[in-house]
Image (cartoon, helix red, strand yellow):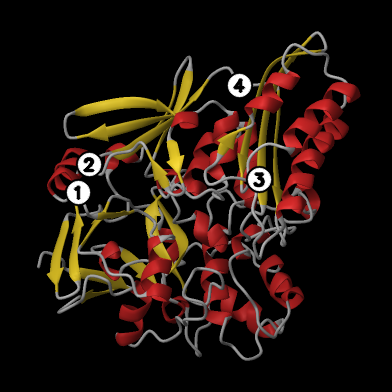
C-alpha cells in the first residue's frame, strides 16, 4: 500500500486497511462523520455533499462541493476535506448553519448537512458579490451574489426550497478571521501518487501523463476514472468492481487550457466547472450547455474527457462540441493523434480510442460561428438526462447560410452530426422558408427509439421544433 489518508476537518486520518472501491462517503461515515448521508448513491440528491480543497482560479485554493458517494476514498488521498461537522457545532454555528436554522431551512434534517456544504462552497466562492444596490443580477442570483445553481444538485424531501433560498440570500461575506476563508490564500496540498492493492482490486494514481500512459499500456483492461461521476454509479448501484482503477483527475498535463490563434485546447481532466470559469465566455455555445449539464455538484467533479470517453449517446457535451467542429487529442505511450469528434464514435458507448489511449484534450477551432444555440429537451429544466439535445453553429453572411454544423444527442446509438440538415441549410438564404425546409429534414435525422424518457415520435418532433425555435429566436 502507498496511501496515507485524508485531512478531515483539520485532522489527518490514516486510511489503514481500506478496500480500493470504498467510497469517500462510506469511509467518512466509518470515521464518525455521519452528517454525510447516502440518499440515492448516484449523485442526484446531494445528501452526501462535502467540501474539498482544490486549486482556485482567483485565489490559490477554492472550497469545492462534491458528491462523496461517487468518489473513491482513495481518490482523495492526501487532500483536505471539510464535512458539515467541520463547519460548526451546536455551540458555535457556522453562518450557513445559522441562517438555515433561523429561516426554517430544515425539517427532518436528512438533507440539511449536504445543503449546508453546498451552500458553504458558494459562501466562500471568491468573486461572489452583491448586485448594484443589493439587487439580484437575475432570478437565479440573490442580492448577495449567491448563485442558486450551487444548490441545483441538492434535493429537499420535506422542507421546501423557499426557506433554503432565503437562508442562502441572507448570507453576508466571511469574517476576516474565518479559518476556511483564510485557508484559500495558501495552495492546496498537491496530489500525490497512490498505489493500493486489495481483495477487490487495485487503485493507482500516477503522478504524470507519461506514467498514466505506461500504466494503460501495461493494464489495457484498467478502468480510468477522473470525477467518477459515471463509474461511481456503477460501483454503488450495480456492484461493479474493476481489477484495476487508474485515477487521472490530478494529472497536470490533463488540466491545461490554452487559447491559441486558431484553436482553444481544453485539457480532458478539467471539470466542467473549471472549464466554464476558465473560458470566461470565450465559447458562447458552451456557456449555454454548462447550466443545463447535470448539477453544480456533478459539474464540480465531471470532466469533459470523461463525458466524451464514456461514449454515451445522451451526454450533453458531445452535441455542442460536434457543432463546434471539435477534435480530440488522443495520447498513448508512443505519441498522439488528432481525431475529429465527428469520426470518434463508432457505436453505442464505443469509439476509435484504443484501450491504451487517453483523451488528452479537446480542440475547438477558431473563429467560431456567429449564430449558436444549445437546446436540451428533458423532463426537468436542470439536473436531468436529455431526451434530445441539439447544438447549432451557423455562419451567416449577407443573409446566406455559408456554413452549418448541427450536433445531435439522444436520437441514435451515438451522438451524430445532422449532415442532411447541414446540406439543406448551406448556400441558402437564412429565411423562414429555409428554416422550415431544413427543420423537416432534421425531423428525419438519426434513428430515435421509444424509451421511458420519450417516444421516437416525440424525439423526431422535437428535432423539427428545435430548428424552428432557432429561427424564431434569432430572426433574420
Q: Are marks 1 and 3 in contact (CB under 8 Å)?
A: no
Of 206 and 34, nearer the camera is: 206
Q: Are marks 1 and 2 in contact (CB under 8 Å)?
A: yes
Quadrant for residue 417, please give it.
top right
Rounded to the nearest whole Å, what is the CA distance between mark 2 and mark 4?
32 Å
In the picture of the structure, the residue carrying the numbered disc 2 is: 356
Which is more foreground, mark 4 or mark 1? 1
Question: Residue 206, labelled with which disc?
Answer: none
Mark 4: give few (<14), some (14-19) or many (20+) Cα within 10 Å: some
| Front position in the image: 280 or 473 | 473
Please say if the residues under marks 4 and 1 sit with CB atoms less than 8 Å apart. no
Considering depth in this image, is 294 or 138 the residue closer to the camera?
Answer: 294
Mark 1 sits on what residue? 220
> Which one is earlier in the sequence, the residue at label 1 or at label 3?
1
Question: The residue tagged with tag 4: helix, strand or loop?
Answer: loop
Task: In the rendered view, tell whether residue 169 sits above or below residue 439.
Answer: below
Residue at the spot of label 3: 389
Mark 1, residues whose alpha carbon is within 10 Å: few (<14), some, or many (≥20)? some
Cα separation between marks 1 and 2: 6 Å
Q: Secondary structure at mark 3?
A: strand
Q: Which residue is mark 4?
A: 368
Q: Earlier in the sequence, mark 2 or mark 4?
A: 2
Q: Give the left or right position of residue 402, taking residue 311 as reference.
A: right
Amino acid at each position: 500500500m502507498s496511501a496515507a489518508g485524508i485531512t478531515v476537518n483539520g485532522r489527518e486520518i490514516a486510511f489503514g486497511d481500506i478496500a480500493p472501491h470504498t467510497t469517500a462517503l462510506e469511509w467518512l461515515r466509518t470515521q464518525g462523520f455521519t452528517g454525510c448521508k447516502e440518499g440515492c448513491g448516484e449523485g442526484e440528491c446531494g445528501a452526501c455533499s462535502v467540501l474539498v480543497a482544490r486549486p482556485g482560479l482567483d485565489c490559490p485554493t477554492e472550497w469545492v462541493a462534491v458528491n462523496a458517494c461517487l468518489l473513491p476514498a482513495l481518490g482523495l488521498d492526501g487532500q483536505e476535506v471539510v464535512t458539515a461537522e467541520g463547519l460548526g457545532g451546536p455551540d458555535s454555528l457556522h453562518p450557513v448553519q445559522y441562517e438555515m436554522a433561523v429561516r426554517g431551512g430544515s425539517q427532518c434534517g436528512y438533507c440539511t448537512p449536504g445543503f449546508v456544504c453546498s451552500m458553504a462552497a458558494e459562501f466562500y466562492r471568491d468573486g461572489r458579490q452583491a448586485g448594484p444596490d443589493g439587487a439580484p443580477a437575475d432570478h437565479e442570483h440573490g442580492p448577495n451574489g449567491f448563485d442558486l445553481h450551487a444548490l441545483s444538485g441538492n434535493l429537499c424531501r420535506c422542507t421546501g426550497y423557499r426557506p433554503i433560498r432565503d437562508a442562502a440570500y441572507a448570507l453576508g461575506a466571511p469574517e476576516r478571521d474565518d479559518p476556511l476563508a483564510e485557508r484559500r490564500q495558501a495552495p492546496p496540498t498537491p496530489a500525490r501518487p497512490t498505489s493500493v492493492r486489495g481483495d477487490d482490486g487495485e487503485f493507482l494514481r500516477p503522478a504524470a501523463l507519461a506514467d498514466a500512459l505506461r500504466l494503460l499500456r501495461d493494464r489495457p483492461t484498467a478502468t480510468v476514472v477522473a470525477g467518477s461521476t459515471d463509474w461511481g454509479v456503477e460501483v454503488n448501484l450495480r456492484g461493479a468492481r474493476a481489477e484495476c482503477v487508474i485515477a487521472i483527475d490530478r494529472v497536470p498535463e490533463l488540466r491545461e487550457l490554452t487559447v491559441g490563434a486558431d484553436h482553444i485546447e481544453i485539457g480532458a481532466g478539467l471539470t466542467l466547472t473549471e472549464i466554464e470559469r476558465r473560458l470566461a465566455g470565450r465559447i458562447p455555445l458552451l456557456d449555454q450547455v454548462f447550466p443545463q449539464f447535470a448539477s453544480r455538484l456533478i459539474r464540480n467533479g465531471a470532466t469533459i474527457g470523461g463525458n466524451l470517453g464514456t461514449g454515451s449517446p445522451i451526454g450533453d457535451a458531445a452535441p455542442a462540441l460536434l457543432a463546434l467542429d471539435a477534435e480530440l487529442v488522443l495520447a498513448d505511450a508512443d505519441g498522439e493523434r488528432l481525431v475529429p469528434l465527428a469520426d470518434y464514435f463508432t457505436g453505442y458507448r464505443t469509439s476509435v480510442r484504443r484501450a491504451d489511449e487517453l483523451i488528452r484534450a479537446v480542440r475547438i477551432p477558431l473563429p467560431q460561428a456567429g449564430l449558436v444555440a444549445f437546446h436540451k429537451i428533458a423532463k426537468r429544466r436542470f439536473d436531468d438526462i436529455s431526451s434530445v439535445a441539439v447544438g447549432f453553429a451557423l455562419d451567416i453572411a449577407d443573409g446566406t447560410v455559408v456554413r452549418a454544423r448541427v450536433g445531435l444527442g439522444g436520437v441514435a446509438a451515438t451522438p451524430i452530426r445532422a449532415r442532411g440538415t447541414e446540406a439543406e441549410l448551406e448556400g441558402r438564404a437564412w429565411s423562414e422558408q429555409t428554416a422550415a425546409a431544413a427543420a423537416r429534414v432534421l425531423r428525419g435525422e438519426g434513428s430515435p427509439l421509444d424509451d421511458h424518457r420519450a417516444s421516437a415520435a416525440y424525439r423526431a418532433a422535437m428535432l423539427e421544433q428545435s430548428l424552428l425555435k432557432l429561427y424564431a429566436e434569432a430572426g433574420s
